[in-house]
Image (cartoon, rainbow, N blue to C red):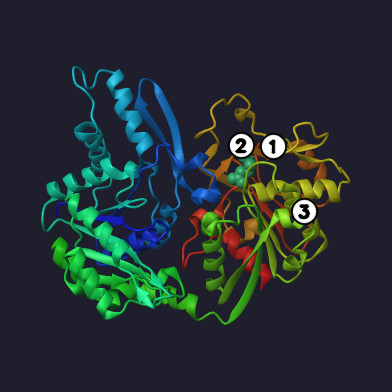
Amino acid sequence: MPTKLVIITGGVISGLGKGVISASVGKLLQSMGLSVSMIKIDPYLNPDPGTLNPVEHGEVFITEEVWNFSPGGGVSFKIAEIDEDFGHYERFLDVYMHPSNNITSGQVMLSVILGERKGEYLGRTIRLIPHVTDKIKERVKEVIDRERPDVVIVELGGTVGDYEAMPFVEALRQLKLEFGNGNSMHIHVTYVPYVRTVGEFKTKPAQLFFREVLAAGLPPDVVIARVEGGLPPDVRDKLALYASVPPDAVFEDPDLDTVYELPLYLEEKGFSRILKKKLRIDGEVNLAEWKAIVDSFKSCDRELKVAMVGKYWRMSDVYISIVEALKHAGAYRGAHVNIVPVDSEELERGNDWNLLEGADGVLLTPGFGSRGTEGMIKAAEWGLDSDKPLLGICFGAQLSTVAFARKVMGWREANSTEIDPSTPYPVIDLLPEQKSVELIGGTMRLGGHEVKLLGGKLREVYSREVVVERFRHRYHIMNDYAYRMEDKGYRVVATDLSGEIINAFEVEWHPFFLGVQFHPEFKSRPGKPSPTYLAFVEAML
Ligand code: GLN
């Protein structure tokens, strides 16, 4: 069977949950026994999202593999930092995504311009069409050639009509034409607001975006609508009419108890019938296993409260993989995990300490820069005094090491050199290979690395000696200080294979105080929780 193409675009506003919708469509196809590749296009000009402000952009997802992106002219970048939607893809499909499946304008433009310098376009004027659009299609085809899937799903980030999205919309139109009828389809995700003062649903914004995709030559085959409070039949008919699809091709994306329920919901509404018809595929949807996992989320009979301390709480998606990993581990043990956001800057002002008191456990989040770090360190010092379980991830592990140095060792001015370059006790400092790094983008220690588990609770819960976890850091825990702290119960429980880079520590005399330099959340799956998070949840229970 030739590869089939599913295009997913959005209208009206971004942030409609297109990533979960794309992952759910992928899940339906996968449950029919088909292999699925996922591509996400991000039209911004950054080559990857690694340098974006998390509060503006959300989480940066880290892949296992690091891609050496070489656009030409001897220039190359390491890419393992990609869009957060890849987290949904990995969690729903239980796969490892390749970083080159996240195509950005920045990458495409670099390839075209450096290609020109190499003489790839000799004699020609480079244009958005056909040169940039050709490069976009080439990138999609590279994924197909590498993964040879039955179906490739291409999600276009943002909304159609964004200036940056135009060459991508045109490339997608051409691709759809090349794949042809019966081998391709277009799902358009839209939003219908309800205007309370007049008591009416308003489809006008959706209509304008239907017009946009119709004019671009990319008519929708299916419309999925986010509607406040449920989609009434007359609104469905109106959307169908303006999008030029039959009413049974209009679906709703309702608020569900758990995001993992969406494939089941879509299937219940007959979604696979349309997939089969439009893509001319057969096979029966079998979601029995997935349904058992979803049920485990819905049948939890215990409640846990995790106080998550960080400074990026203005945007809820920033810690999405961590939140999901906590939920996976909770559901696995029959516990529903409630997240209590704690702003570390509020802790610095003396506020919100009751949130820590009222929680079953504390999680110190990853992050960068000095803002809000005193609050994080104080929270870890508080954690050393309390017997509540505490888990520090990456920056959280580094700052809880600082807390141990200050509180237990009495090194009051201990710090990370990221925060205080002239601290007399630099317990956290740059990785040796980072000292000569000049560029900011794509230069951290990234991607999957082997971790040697030496002992403690961590070794127990993984029940293996060597595991691969994903990393994203420039700084690390300094050996000489760590081994001096071992006298007082700070215990190094994991290192890299050379034994040089400390990957995790526990506090021996504490019921559960664990810091990991890696990001185990990226490998957690519903039904297959990350051992690190499972240990934390079990300690809380
Ligand atoms: N800022 C820290 C470092 O670069 C931690 C990074 C993180 O939490 N991902 O090492």
Within 8 Å of ligand 1, the CB of disc 1? yes
Q: Position of residue 176 (x, y in %)?
A: 17, 50
Q: Depth check: 20 or 296 in front?
A: 20
Task: Report the Cα–Cα distance between label 2 and label 3.
Answer: 25 Å
Q: Which mark is residue 418?
A: 1
* Horizontal relation, residue 308 to residue 72: left or right: right
Q: Secondary structure at mark 2?
A: loop
- Is the CB of mark 2 within 8 Å of ligand 1? yes
Position of residue 532 in the picture relative to residue 219 (left or right): right
Residue 143 seen in the figure: no
* Number of other residues with Cα within 10 Å of mark 1, as a class: few under 14, some 14 to 19, many 20 or more: some
Q: Which residue is mark 3?
A: 348
Residue most toward the left?
A: 181
Q: Residues within 10 Å of mark 2 (few under 14, many from 20)?
A: some
Q: Residue at x 60, y 57 (%)?
A: 313
Q: Residue at x 69, y 37 (%)?
A: 418
Nearest the viewer among 292 and 372 is 372
What amino acid is labelled 3 in the image? Glu
Q: CA distance from mark 1 to mark 2?
A: 9 Å
Q: Nearer the viewer, mark 1 or mark 2?
A: 1
Query: What is the spatial separation of the Cα atoms under label 3 and label 1, in whole angstroms?
Result: 19 Å
**Pointers 2 and 3 in contact (C-beta within 8 Å):** no
The residue that disc 2 covers is 474
Residue at 70% x, 70% y: name it: 359
Q: Secondary structure at mark 3?
A: helix
Residue 538: tell me if it is visible. yes
Residue 21 image point, x, y percent: 35, 63
Residue 201 vertical position relative to residue 94 in the rendered view, above or below: below
| Mark toward the start of the polypeptide (1 vs 2) | 1
Tag 1: residue type? Glu
